[in-house]
Image (spheres, rainbow, N blue to C red):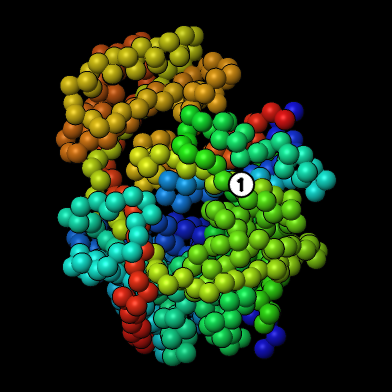
Amino acid sequence: MLLNQLAHARTGDKGNIVTISLIAYRQNDFGLLEEAVTAERVAAHFSELIEGPVHRYTLPQLGALNFALHRPLSNSVTRSLALDAHGKCLGSALLALEI
Amino acid sequence: MNTVRIGSGAGYSGDRIDPAVELAERGDISYLVFECLAERTIAIAQKARLLDPAAGYDPLLEERMRAVLPICADRHIRIISNMGAANPQAAAAKTRDIAKQLGLPGLRIAAVTGDDVLEILQTGLNVIETPEGPLPPADTWLSANAYLGVSPILEALQSNADIILTGRVADPALFLAPLIHEFRWPLDNWNLLGQGTVVGHLLECAGQLTGGYFADPGFKDVPNLDRLGFPIAEVSSDGSAILTKVAGSGGFLNRATCTEQLLYEIQDPSAYYTPDVIADFAQVSFEELGDDRVRVSGGAGHARPSTLKVSIGYRDGYIGEGQISYAGPNALARAELARNILTKRLAGHVLSELRFDFIGLNSIHGAHLSSNAPVPYEVRLRAAGRATSLATASWIPREVEALYTNGPAGGGGASGSTREIVAITSALIPRESISHHVQILES
């Protein structure tokens, strides 16, 4: 199934950093998210758009994972040529992950 | 005083004004905060100020003030906002004039300055670190603004200001300052400042806490989003708060909306850097108390950093952009042909970067993530490129428009623009190298 069946996400931006929170609809599913949505898997998923490692932070009491991704400096919010210069739509791409 | 009620009247410069009026009228609040400065906003405002010394503050300042001042004056609601942007003194003078025109004498309006460090940076201020790579040449700099903390806002509140207009201030500080003022929190009680920062961070994007930026039909349905209400925090002296909104307004507030907003734009939740405290969100929890009432607690903090962040706005060349649509049978093939033609026609111009997107197919998530997407009925070709001169960049929209009569069949709806890029980078400077000023005008 796709991740959007189990969790919701919000994307934020600061310069060339994109942050994506991933939050379980049901607290019971948090363990599955923690196991399946690793930093490495997220890095591979977004490999065309980001560079360097992805950092993952865990907030079990909120049923949430938080990811920090780095875009190339030429693609920071204020310099990007992309239609979505902020990268605000990237959280939706994470929800398309198959688990 | 047991609790303080703070309303969030704007989450960005262009935000909707009606919800702020609703908060002032029916929110039973003591403070109304407008957060209106994105990273680049102040550099763009600085460009406006260079053309007109009386400009450079928020473009909606006048409209907002006219809408809320009579209500706020009547109910003794104090207003705190960074709508001063690149010119807080002009914003304060404008607000004083509006108050006079509205027949509201005796309002005290504070202008907070000191965040503008362009001059001292250009004359060799000691920069400690440049986290986003080396700084661009100084002759391209338009603006340099340090993120101030709560101190000047506290000073204004102690001087009985009714309206406080700042330039660059850390967003949560706009909310943290009235809490420190009301509860007399010591400025080195890091856990209280950390919890207050949690509250400020949750409120600073206004409607994003109450169901804005949240709805996903069938998965996350939000009621009455068309009349989305903005949030209120009812804060206790221990820094915990009940998050709520005006009864009957649209949207909703629950654990899910609060969790999304808590982590919005946060990297490491245990170390959120602000000028006043390094806040720790790692143990924050939410408790649903009832409809649209969520209790937040568990924020903590560590000693404030010794450096302040400075955002530097600089001229970074020009972006030219053009778009044209193709629809019906073979639309994608015609759009691809148009792209190939543009690639050749633009090859003679010096563009440091050029990209093409097929809107409706892969423009947002890129070719890799969109590889299984079905071929759409209609597709919009977009070309965007970077150049060092306006004239060169403008070749992009020009050549896109020329596809009408010089390109594939059936192109339509061409549009284009060329604009100067005002880019932002950051630097860290010693805290001691700046000082703030508070000037008070009276209507």
Q: Residue at x 43, y 46 (%)?
A: A16
B122 with respect to A67 (left or right): left
Q: Residue at x 45, y 14 (%)?
A: B332
**Which quarter of the picture shows residue B106?**
bottom left
Q: Residue at x 35, y 83 (%)?
A: B438
Q: Residues within 10 Å of mark 1 (few under 14, many from 20)?
A: many
Q: Quadrant of the C terminus of chain B?
A: bottom left
Q: Residue at x 37, y 74 (%)?
A: B431
Q: Quadrant of the N terminus of chain B?
A: bottom right
Total count of labels: 1
The image shows residue B240 at horizontal and vertical percentages of 69, 74
Q: Is residue A74 in sight in this rendering?
A: yes
Residue identified by numbered label 1: A56
Identity of the amino acid at label 1?
A: Arg
Q: Nearer the viewer, residue A77 or B393?
A: A77
Q: Is residue B415 above or below residue B411?
A: below
Q: Is residue B361 above or below residue B16?
A: above
The image shows residue A88 at horizontal and vertical percentages of 51, 43
Q: Is residue B317 above or below residue B94?
A: above
Q: Is residue B26 in sight in this rendering?
A: no
Specify the farthest residue to the right. Answer: A28
Q: Is residue A17 above or below residue A97?
A: below
